[in-house]
Structures are given as structure tokens and as C-alpha cells.
Amino acid sequence: MISSATFLPTLTAEERRLMKTLDSPYRIQAFLDTVPYSAEPVYRCPLQVLRDRLAHCFDGALFAAAALRLIGFPPLILDMIPDDRDDDHLLALFKQEGHWGAIAKSNFAGLRFREPVYRTLRELVLSYFEQYYNVEREKTLRGYTVPLNLTVFDTYAWMTRDADLERIADRLDTIRRHSLLTPGMIARLSPVDERLYRAGLEGSDPDGLFRP
């Protein structure tokens, strides 16, 4: 079993020094922003993200959850659920002064960090709504899961091993979820305008974009 108490000893001296600089949610996000987006259909554990310097949204959320754990936060993730014309998007959650914030790795500029100013998870998730769209300029966010505490996967050494990360993905598919929109709301959604569309894709990797 690998938990926060035994994660640091698995690192090299240079890796430990780097992790010790990630002493706030914002600094964790800043590190993830330096990591190229991975278009590969594989999962990387936090240790492998650190060593490969590659991550997609699943990998990035797990890395952020692990880094948050090292500075005293529970390792919580939340899955934002789109319609069938887009990809899920994972957030690592943290709470300060009773308000929620998030860290995320994304191919879209607007789907990353959120300051801890949101009173509820619904408020937090809805802050991503206008920026959550596909390459057809359709706004696709439809719901979200309840938070998943990754400590239940410590027995699988999720912080240091890739082998069992599929268990986390499978669990996200089965936990309780909340809907955000009614059918009428969905029917009235407008397309994303050109300026927001271009801004969201600034710096994106075309190979990592979901194609409906």
C-alpha cells in the first residue's frame, strides 16, 4: 500500500525537491500547466506523470489529488459528465474556508483551475459550463459525479503504479451523479461563438481533441 506517508520516499532527491515546491493548489496547477497534454490512450499514475512529464485530464486529476494530499487535503476527484458528443473531464477538488476550488489538466484553456470561492459543487461545476464544448462548438456539459475519495484505492498503490488505474475509471462510471440541465434547456443551447472557441483552443494539441 502506498499512501502520502510513503510516497515521497519513492522519489529521487530531485523529484522530492520539486514536490516540496508544490505547497499550494495554485502551484500544483502551475506545474500541471507546464506538462504537455497527452493524447495517448493510457493512464499514468502521479509518479509516472512526474517522470514522463505527460498527462491528460485523468492523469492530471490524479496527480493533483496526490499533490493536494501531501499538503494536507483529502485526495478527492469529481467527474464532469458531457453528452455522448464529448469526453468526460476530471477535477481534483479542494476546499478552503468552506468553499470549493479545483485543479485540472485540460486540452482546453478554460477547463483548468478554479479558485476556492464556490459554496457548492454544483456552483463549481457550472463555472465550467460555457467553456465545456466540443470541436463542433456545441456546449456539452450535462452533469457531474459525487466526489470520489482516492484513499479507498490505496491498496492498489494508485499514486505509484499504473496497473490498476482502470479501477478508478470504472468506479467513476458507477457512483452517483447529478444532472445539470433539463431537456428544454438543452434544446435552447446556443453554439459557442468564434472568439470563445478560438480562445479555448489556444495551445491545444489537435491529436488530443475528441471528435464527435
Image: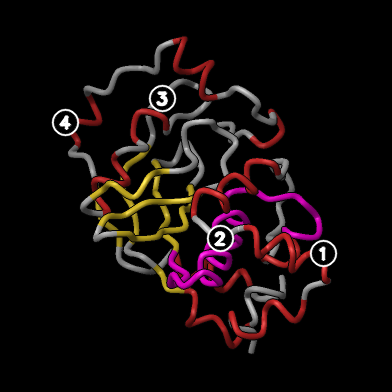
Note whether 173 is above or below 182 in the view shown: below
Amino acid type at circle 2 is: Asp
**First in sequence: mark 4 or mark 2?**
2
Give x and y (percent) for residue 173. 44, 63
Q: CA distance from mark 3 to mark 1?
A: 43 Å
Which image quadrant is residue 96 in? bottom left
Residue 23 — which label? 2
Quick check: is 155 in the magenta stretch? no
Which residue bears the numbered disc 4?
A: 184
Give the secondary structure at mark 1. helix
Residue 138 — which label? 3
Give the secondary structure at mark 2. loop
Give x and y (percent) for residue 4. 59, 79
At horizontal 65% and vertical 58% (from top left) the residue drawn is: 21
**First in sequence: mark 4 or mark 1?**
1
Amino acid type at circle 4 is: Gly
Give the secondary structure at mark 3. loop
Give the secondary structure at mark 4. helix
At horizontal 56% and vertical 59% (from top left) the residue drawn is: 64
Amino acid type at circle 1 is: Glu
Q: Residues within 10 Å of mark 4 (few under 14, many from 20)?
A: few
Note whether 162 is above or below 28 in the view shown: below
- Which residue range is magenta in the image? 49-76
Which residue bears the numbered disc 1?
A: 14
Which image quadrant is residue 76 in? bottom left
Q: Residues within 10 Å of mark 3 (few under 14, many from 20)?
A: some
Amino acid type at circle 3 is: Glu
Q: Residues within 10 Å of mark 1 (few under 14, many from 20)?
A: few
Give x and y (percent) for residue 26. 51, 48
Q: Nearer the viewer, mark 4 or mark 2?
A: 2
Give x and y (percent) for residue 19. 67, 63
Q: CA distance from mark 4 to mark 1?
A: 54 Å
